Image (cartoon, grey):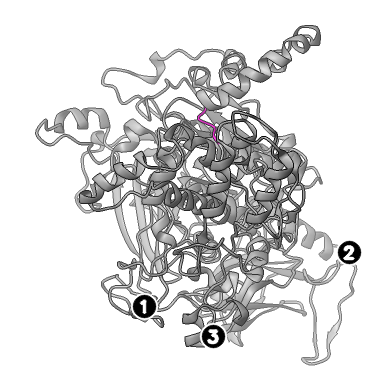
């Protein structure tokens, strides 16, 4: 019924045309009269063909869900490349023809409808391989198919299906199976055999958000697309059929995409991630740690994850987006048209959402990000600075335990005292050191154990294998960044007569520790020494005495392609950012406000972003991901119901629910409109209490308005914005100088909201300068201070100028190479690369099956929204 309702506007327009109104295909205005096709001598009929599952030029896998609407389709004949496929389409209650057509050839296909009373409708459909690419250009090679029975070299195989169920009481299951000698969490979902099912009373019952009650049985579809694995889960009634024309009643038409954490590359297949917390929550962990995946399933969502959209497996923004485009098409074709799509994920899962949404808007309609970073490549600048400072300070931790003594000795002999390290890092030292161990090795092109390669190629070694495979983050994105020009070639590039992938970051002119010097935390001699000796990274991501020099084309392409997330194209998506304190694992709270600052810079506001801060490390609270799903669902449902002819960004703001507000701590959770939730209980109390003897009807529902008051009041712990309390200016204004100071302290003490080496060097919180413009050294930047040893600013500036003969960073000017981010770029075909991308052709068609009309998903390229 939902699919029929979505088709009614088009059917009504066609019916009007048949009752005396003007008509035409969707490629012509409605007042265009019927014309004669000079080539075929056939009359163009009044009506329209719509491809619902994707844009007609981006179809993959040989099939597409299509709809035909005309005034009278009785006796119509449907031809695909001249072959009659009329039986593939079904006449619907609203008079349209709808069906999944298959047998599309690679490349262009003609779909032609010969109307019963004369006239012809045509649509060109361009089909791409199921193994890709669609728009990403030449694929990474070599590629290792790790599935058992691939039918071709793109790892294709038929999808597998299995069933799982949730027991009546997960808590009882845990208690009954707890083994003190081997403690752990039970699987949240148990295997379900349709041929030998468990007793009905042992299966939990759930009621979806549309009031449909069914057993909590989930079908898991696992398949291969774009050379890698995907997973789709849904509530499923095993005794019933499910098609795109007739979905099972428990599906609410919504999709949740979940992602994995970390950052990395791979030359072979991976596994679709599960779990909200960096994709690493163990089976059963959602009961105690909370997650939105099982909640979404219980409410009637279809959930999706792909290996290619897991940043820890695939750092490439374009192929990650492509995998989601292909699998969303598959969902529309096999499950039915979608109302809207929500993303969720922590760390790398947050990056994947935010930079895909900025470069390929329309894939998501809402984002839920945890332990967030904005993108890979400004974060790479931060981590490269950490690496260089660790090298300079002797804070490199060896993987060999035997080197521990040498590490301790290096700390004791550091040129900067340990208490001064935060003044250079912009952060407590533990995070920079952890980042080196956890993330920096992924950047190196000579990784000894290159992920997924399985011996299919020799890995690059600068000494012994200069022609080997470069297994690192930068070379993995060579189609986006481009290769280095001959004048910059290293000896190995000269030997091979080809450039390696260009480096999109730089530290020329960066004055490390500038604010620390100005604040009297480090001495002038220490400032001069670190900037004289900091060095940089060469094309092999090895330390060098000279500063890092960005490749000009790679730098510009990083902004152009969206690899650097400038947040230019995020105004059409609501964002809920879940954040907690960082105990020292490289996910400090700074990054949530970093994204906010970018939104404010590009949009003039950040009203579409909400930050929830809590005390639980990284994630804020174990109930946050569940709460955020409910609030985001409410937000998007209101946008969907908004039929005003206003731009989507305006609808995002106009339909923002009162629950979508900045929060600190979880005290308002018991007052949720969807029912009370106790902080730090995970999913123990939602959707049904998992505590034996406790029933949801026993939990009192408290007034939601009290929760709103608590959010404002407790928010003072993290913000102290007295204006939010509604107090008169006569009270707030005199207190402002005091509260401003307290806020700054709270940012560090409560939120662990630190900075980066670049903010210490003078960059703004947006930190979008992967290479800065330069200015002459200014003596005013080096105040005279007997505590720092700077007795004469002019003389000190001369010493600085000797280190920076070309000048120092001028952060008042735009970054070098910054250009607008272009959306929906394509990078060639299987054989030919279009370096840096070019926009896909513009189209006047919306992608009707991806989201409700209110979201206006059209995939048209643009430099902004």
- CA–CA distance between discs 3 and 2? 51 Å
Residue 472: image location, x then y, percent: 44, 66
First in sequence, mark 3 or 1: give its number: 1
- CA–CA distance between discs 3 and 1? 31 Å
For mark 1, give the secondary structure.
loop
Residue 57: image location, x then y, percent: 64, 74
Q: Which residue is mark 2?
A: 20
Residue 609, located in which quarter of the rendered image?
A: top right
Residue 785: image location, x then y, percent: 65, 30
- In the foreground, 613 or 148: 613
**Contact (CB < 8 A) between labels 3 and 2?**
no
Instruction: Identify the residue at horizontal 59%, vertical 60% (top origin).
Output: 505
In magenta, the rendered stretch is: 750-754
Query: With respect to residue 91, does 250 lie above or below?
Result: above
- In the foreground, 222 or 585: 585
Q: Which residue is mark 1?
A: 463
Tell me if 9 is positioned left or right of 490 in this view. Answer: right
First in sequence, mark 1 or 2: give its number: 2
* Number of other residues with Cα within 10 Å of mark 1, as a class: few under 14, some 14 to 19, many 20 or more: few
Tell me if 410 is positioned left or right of 342 in this view. Answer: left
For marks 3 and 1, give the one nearer the viewer: 1
- In the foreground, 588 or 462: 462
Instruction: Identify the residue at horizontal 39%, vertical 48% (top origin).
Output: 394
For mark 2, give the secondary structure.
loop
For marks 3 and 2, give the one nearer the viewer: 3
Q: Is residue 275 magenta?
A: no
Residue 846, located in which quarter of the rendered image?
A: bottom right
Q: Which residue is mark 3?
A: 831
- CA–CA distance between discs 1 and 2? 78 Å
């Amino acid at each position: 019924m939902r699919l029929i309702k979505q088709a009614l506007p088009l059917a009504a327009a066609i019916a009007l045309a048949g009752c005396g109104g003007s008509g035409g295909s969707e490629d012509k205005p409605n007042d265009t009269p019927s014309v004669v096709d000079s080539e075929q001598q056939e009359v163009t009929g009044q009506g329209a063909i719509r491809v619902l599952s994707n844009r007609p030029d981006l179809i993959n896998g040989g099939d597409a869900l299509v709809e035909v609407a005309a005034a009278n389709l009785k006796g119509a004949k449907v031809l695909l490349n001249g072959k009659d496929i009329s039986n593939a389409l079904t006449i619907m209650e609203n008079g349209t023809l709808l069906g999944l057509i298959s047998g599309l050839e690679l490349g262009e296909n003609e779909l032609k409808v010969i109307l019963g009373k004369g006239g012809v409708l045509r649509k060109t459909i361009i089909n791409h391989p199921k193994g890709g690419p669609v728009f990403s250009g030449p694929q990474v090679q070599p590629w290792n198919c790790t599935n058992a029975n691939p039918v071709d070299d793109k790892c294709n195989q038929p999808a597998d299906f299995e069933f799982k169920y949730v027991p009546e009481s997960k808590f009882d299951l845990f208690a009954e199976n707890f083994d003190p000698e081997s403690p752990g969490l039970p699987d949240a979902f148990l295997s379900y055999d349709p041929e030998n099912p468990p007793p009905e009373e042992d299966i939990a019952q759930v009621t979806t958000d549309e009031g449909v009650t069914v057993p909590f049985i989930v079908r898991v579809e696992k398949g291969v697309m774009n050379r890698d694995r995907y997973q789709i889960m849904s509530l499923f009634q095993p005794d019933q059929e499910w098609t795109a024309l007739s979905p099972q009643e428990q599906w609410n038409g919504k999709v949740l995409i979940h992602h994995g954490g970390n950052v990395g590359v791979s030359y072979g297949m991976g596994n679709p991630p599960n779990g909200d917390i960096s994709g690493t929550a163990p089976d059963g962990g959602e009961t105690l740690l909370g997650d939105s995946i099982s909640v979404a399933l219980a409410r009637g969502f279809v959930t999706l994850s792909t290996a290619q959209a897991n940043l820890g497996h695939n750092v490439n923004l374009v192929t990650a987006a492509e995998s989601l485009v292909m699998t969303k098409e598959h969902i529309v074709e096999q499950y039915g048209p979608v109302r809207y799509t929500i993303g969720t994920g922590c760390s790398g899962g947050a990056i994947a959402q935010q930079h895909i949404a900025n470069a390929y808007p329309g894939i998501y309609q809402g984002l839920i990000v945890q332990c967030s970073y904005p993108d890979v490549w400004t974060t790479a600048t931060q981590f490269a600075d950490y690496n260089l400072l660790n090298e300079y300070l002797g804070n490199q931790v060896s993987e060999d335990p035997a080197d521990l003594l040498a590490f301790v000795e290096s700390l004791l002999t550091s040129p900067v005292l340990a208490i001064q390290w935060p003044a250079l890092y912009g952060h407590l030292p533990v995070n920079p050191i952890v980042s080196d161990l956890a993330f920096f090795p992924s950047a190196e092109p000579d990784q000894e154990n290159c992920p997924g390669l399985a011996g299919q190629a020799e890995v690059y070694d600068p000494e012994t294998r200069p022609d080997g495979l470069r297994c690192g983050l930068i070379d993995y994105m060579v189609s986006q960044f481009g290769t280095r020009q001959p004048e910059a070639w290293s000896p190995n590039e000269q030997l091979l007569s080809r450039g390696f992938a260009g480096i999109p970051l730089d530290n020329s002119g960066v004055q490390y520790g500038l604010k620390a010097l100005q604040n009297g935390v480090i001495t002038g001699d220490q400032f001069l020494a670190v900037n004289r000796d900091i060095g940089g990274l060469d094309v092999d991501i090895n330390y060098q005495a000279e500063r890092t020099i960005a490749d000009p084309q790679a730098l510009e392409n990083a902004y152009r392609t969206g690899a650097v997330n400038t947040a230019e194209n995020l105004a059409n998506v609501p964002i809920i950012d879940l954040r907690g304190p960082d105990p020292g694992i490289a996910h400090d709270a700074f990054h949530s406000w970093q994204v906010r600052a970018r939104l404010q810079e590009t949009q003039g506001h950040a009203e579409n972003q909400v930050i929830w801060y809590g005390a639980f490390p990284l994630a804020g609270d174990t109930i946050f991901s569940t709460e955020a799903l409910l609030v985001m669902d409410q937000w998007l449902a209101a946008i969907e119901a908004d039929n005003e002819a206003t731009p989507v960004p305006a609808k995002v703001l106009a339909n923002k629910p009162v629950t979508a507000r900045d929060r600190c701590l979880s005290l308002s959770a018991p007052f949720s409109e969807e029912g009370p939730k106790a902080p730090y209980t995970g999913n123990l109390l939602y959707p049904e209490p998992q505590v034996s003897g406790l029933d949801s009807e026993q939990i009192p529902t408290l007034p939601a308005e009290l929760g709103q008051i608590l959010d404002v009041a407790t928010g003072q712990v993290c913000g102290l914005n007295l204006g939010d309390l509604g107090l008169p200016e006569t009270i707030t204004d005199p207190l402002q100088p005091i509260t401003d100071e307290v806020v700054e302290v709270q940012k560090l003490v409560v939120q662990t909201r630190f900075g980066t080496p670049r903010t210490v060097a003078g960059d703004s919180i947006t930190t979008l300068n992967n290479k800065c413009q330069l200015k002459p050294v200014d003596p005013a930047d080096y105040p005279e201070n007997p505590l720092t040893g700077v007795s004469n600013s002019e003389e000190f500036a001369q010493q600085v100028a000797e280190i920076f003969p070309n000048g120092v960073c001028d952060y008042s000017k735009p970054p070098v190479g910054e250009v607008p981010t272009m959306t929906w770029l394509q990078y060639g075909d299987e054989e030919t690369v279009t370096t840096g991308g070019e926009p896909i052709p513009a189209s006047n068609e919306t992608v009707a099956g991806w989201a409700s009309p209110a979201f206006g998903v059209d995939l048209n390229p643009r430099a902004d929204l």
